[in-house]
Image: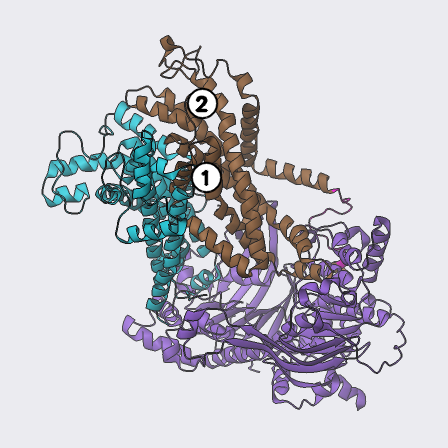
Chain colours: A brown, B purple, C cyan
Amino acid sequence: MADLTYSPQLAAGAAPRSALARGYAHFRYVMTANPVTFLAFLLLAGMIVVALFGPLLAPHDPLATLADQALKPPSAAHWFGTDHLGRDVFSRVIVATRLDLLISVSAVAMSFVCGATLGAFAGYWGGWFDKLSGRLLDTIMAFPLFVLAMGIVAAAGNTIQNIVIATAIINLPFYARVARAEVSIRRNAGYVQAARLSGNSEIRILLMQILPNTLPPMMVQLSLNMGWAILNAAGLSFIGLGVRPPTAEWGIMVAEGANYIVSGEWWLALFPGAALMLAVFTFNLLGDGLRDLVDPQRRT
Amino acid sequence: MSTILHNPPLLAVKDLGVEFATRRGPVTAVRSVTLQIAKGETLGIVGESGSGKSVTSYAVMRILDRAGRIVAGSINFGGMALHGADEDTMSDLRGREISMIFQNPRAALNPIRPIGRQIEDVLIRHAQATHDQARANAIAALERVRIHDAARRYHAYPFELSGGMCQRVVIAIALACRPQLLIADEPTTGLDVTTQKAVMELVRDLTRSEGMSTLLITHDLGLAGEYCDRIVVMEQGRVVEQQDTAALFTAPAHAYTRRLIRSTPHAARTVRDLLPEDLRLPQPPAVPPRAAIAEPLLEVRDLVKAFDMPGGLLRRFTTRGNSGERTFRAVDGISFSIACGESVGLVGESGCGKSTTSAMIMRLLDATSGSIRFKGQELTALPAGEFARSPLRRDLQMVFQDPHESLNPRATAAQSIADPLRRLNGMTRTGEIRSRVEQLATEVGLPCDLLDRLPHQLSGGQKARVGIARAIATRPELLVLDEPTAALDVSVQAVVLNLLADLKAKFGMSYLFVSHDLEVVRLLCERVIVMRAGRIVEAGPTAQILAAPSAHYTRELLAAIPRPAHLPHHADEAKVARA
Amino acid sequence: MGQLTIILARCLQAVPTLFGIVVVTFLLTRALPGDPAAYFAGAAATPESIAEIRAKLGLDQSLPRQFWTYLKDLAGGDLGQSISTGQPVASELLRRLPASLELTLTALLLSVAIAIPLGVLAAVHQDSWIDQVCRFIVTAGVSLPTFFTGLLLIYVFYFLLGLAPAPLGRLDLLHVPPPQVTGFLVFDALIAREWTTAWSAFKQLLLPSITLALFTLAPLARMTRAAMLQALASEYLRTARAAGLSRGRVLMVYAFRNAMLPIITTLGMVFSFSLGANVLVEKVFAWPGIGSYALEALVVSDYAAVQGFVLSMAVLFVLLNLAVDTLYTLVDPRVRIDG
């Protein structure tokens, strides 16, 4: 009968593979079908390598000041030129990768874990917990987020840890909302009801049935949000919060270079700014690619 | 029946071919389709999913998706070639000469525009009214589709109207300019059977009075049989048969048509009649009925479920004169029982409370008041959230309506079936579990090599079987089936219904079969309960209720089921047999 | 249940939000490690002045009492005293607000005027060159740091091309501000008929507002495109097409009006971003608005000023969101009051 033998998508006789083999095949398919995502992955890999091995890759000491070499334009010796204190811009940009990525990744990780947990519980159980957390999130969202981050860092103290915490706090509502929405949609789905009938406890259902299905859209949001977190952290250091000289960090480097742009020394601000842009761009591309992977209907 | 004169046909489609561009290359949706519609005629296109019936109509209207193209053939309307016409010409024709109505009427209306204005837009566009007259004409159009209080309804928004009323508005928009041809693409799918009848009668009256031709696209052969003069049967993008309705039902030429007629529940006497001879599974030996236990397996008494209306303080003050009802009684005190080994049908239209009832019996939902006794124990004693740990969970299982939604997209078929075995039967050894899963798969007719597939790699019928295998894994005594075949094609439905009948006979389960379709219930259930607005209207043996219903509502329901004149009805056969 | 009732209900719902903001700003400054009085007194304060500040600000009292005092001060419009200028914070902010508003509003206008038509055209002509341009702008736009764009624009248009004036603030050195009517220099100059002043103010305004506009352009264009695509793929649009409605009507009345709903919702998010990005742009262009006031205050740890800034920005944002909500209610008849 047509019904029994009709097998969509798998060729006749294709053997079922293990989950790992299936995952790899799917990954390869997406990479080849979508060169832009592939590019994003390459860039990401590159950034991670630079972040891990930064100090080893830098040709000069990022903190070494050479007064007689100040404000030299890009040349063979100094690829990105030197800044107002004679430091090699290239080395500083390379080394700054680690710090910038560390700040953003820890901030996003913190806010993802807290926000997603909060949102998932609120979405699944509803009730007073949902209302209370909703109020809390609304209060955070009532502030223009960058301004709130400024306020938190100004209040708690001008350190890198506080930049991370402030960025984590302002990103929290975002993840909480996405998690709540995704869990809410699935809370009474057919397979969830079936799992209840099969004797699964509510916690088990949340962890084993619902979360694995919500993770893909959340990963998309995570990637898209990472770019924004990087911009926020850099913005905070641009206005003088968190990172102090002589630390090499992209935001503070652009701030230092800003003074010299009107007099034409463009290389101090351009290269760290370009590095910043590239990092954010990579995460955004990645997020778009992941979104296409997860839900092709929502392609932008 | 009107005599069809041999004038040139109004619409002539010849050798039509339509392709869609997809990621994996061009896909042919429709191939060598030829059909005609004469003036004043009603033609039905019948087919299951993937038959290309809707695509054909979209091609005629030239509103195919961006990825779709007409690659072959011709479409002629009133002498004009449509297949190559430019967009301006088509835009003039649409709404004025050819109109179309779709499935899902509420979504088909602009949600933020008053319905009266939507009708006006069409009138003004095709110069059927000036701006001053437009409003009056729109109200007249609403009255023509039998909407009461049309002048007030003119200002209404779609979300304020019922599904049936929305469909009338859609019809009003389509017929506002009195086109020559009306294309109706599954216009009644998703509507209650009584609403369906009202809508179809309306369409028939309006089109006949204007001498309009109609193209009715549907998956329901019974519906086509009642309202169409001629029927075209399509399968996998091709026309398989094309005949006058009477001839089609009395002497179908193609095997597919025969199978389709056979699968339609109207004509079947028993569930086994739904399948052709060669595809019937051998009749399982009937399990001797369990020693008649006096106590019923399931006993429901005065069950009530009331929902609180959403909204806080403000809503109470501002609700528009609706007697300030703050609770909605979805189930309003019902009582019934199911004996061991019995199959009971629970029938009603949407909103009658049957799904809420089944959810309460399954302990997915807590009742507001009333009692549910299962195997002598009171189910309502345990809250729904804790029932998972009760030993009774094993004996009370459910088959869900939508096979696509009821399987975890990330779990293989085997994992889905094994879940109750692990949780409720406490099985832990992989080998043991696997062999049990394979045994279950064989029982439901699912090939074992499909067990390691994910849901999106299975067809609708295969997913339905996985759902059934999962439900019977713990050998429940009572199985609740919530519209298990509503989302399936009619030929697949035939197979699944037979499977359900065989399983019941083999394992001696009791069924509570929830459905809106009386014909399906007739085939599987010995007793039937009719529900409406949260109350039981009538209950009794199926044969008796269907032959001689005592309640007015039941009579209405029965009358609304399409009865094509030429499709032999099971009741007629019984009469013939008796004679 | 008229729309007016719903709007009033929304206004009422804003009250607990405002209260929450006040509580958070209060906690930010009082519930800190260390001695708040020392923060308020400044880095160079003597123990006596710290004690004086402590008594003056009531920091020796219990927390609930302090909160009550704080509320009373707010009600009277008192946001504290700036230690660097000695002026009340509230009057400083008020004085500088028009500059920021002029910048933000000009940027938003520019942004909306470009993003919405671009998004609509990109959705209507899918996969055409305009669609590619839109997608490029969106992807690039969300990746660009505002301060970086500003600096780039200065470098290219001021230093290299000499087209733009020096980024020294609202007016160049040759002109005197016109008499204050609205606080918006361009308007005030036009009202006073000082044409050269108006032109100069306009030129100074151009680069900073373009920088800010570029930032808000991306999310708006992206949402417009997505919303239009969704509207164009909807079933009611299919009905409109099947009824033969003209292309223009279908596009504008049936697709665009429905797409406006999610776009209006995005506006709220865009406001949030631009109020934050305002600070960065004001730093780059030396624009004397409340953002740069806050930055100056940050540098000298002028606590009351920063707190006042955060509070006033939040209140402004709540009011803006209320306006957006009201607009949404007026456009969408399906809006109801819930819980």
C4 on left or right of C85: right
Label 1 packing within 10 angstroms: few (<14), some (14-19), many (20+): many
Q: Earlier in the sequence, mark 2 or mark 1?
A: 1
The vertical placement of C57 against B513, above or below, is above
Q: Quadrant of residue A277?
A: top left
Q: Where is mark 1, residue-wise?
A: A166
Residue type at numbered disc 1: Ala
Subunit that carries the residue with mark 1? A
Q: Where is mark 2, residue-wise?
A: A247
Magenta-colored segment: predominant secondary structure = loop
Subunit that carries the residue with mark 2? A
User: Where does the magenta region start and end?
Assistant: A4-18
Label 2 packing within 10 angstroms: few (<14), some (14-19), many (20+): some
Residue type at numbered disc 2: Thr
Please tell me whether residue A13 belongs to the stretch shown in magenta: yes
- Expressed as whole percent of the image width and height from the top left, the position of residue A25 reads 68, 39
- Expressed as whole percent of the image width and height from the top left, the position of residue B57 reads 54, 63
- Expressed as whole percent of the image width and height from the top left, the position of residue A152 reads 42, 40
SS category of the residue bearing label 1: helix
SS category of the residue bearing label 2: loop
The single residue placed furthest to the left in the displayed view is C193
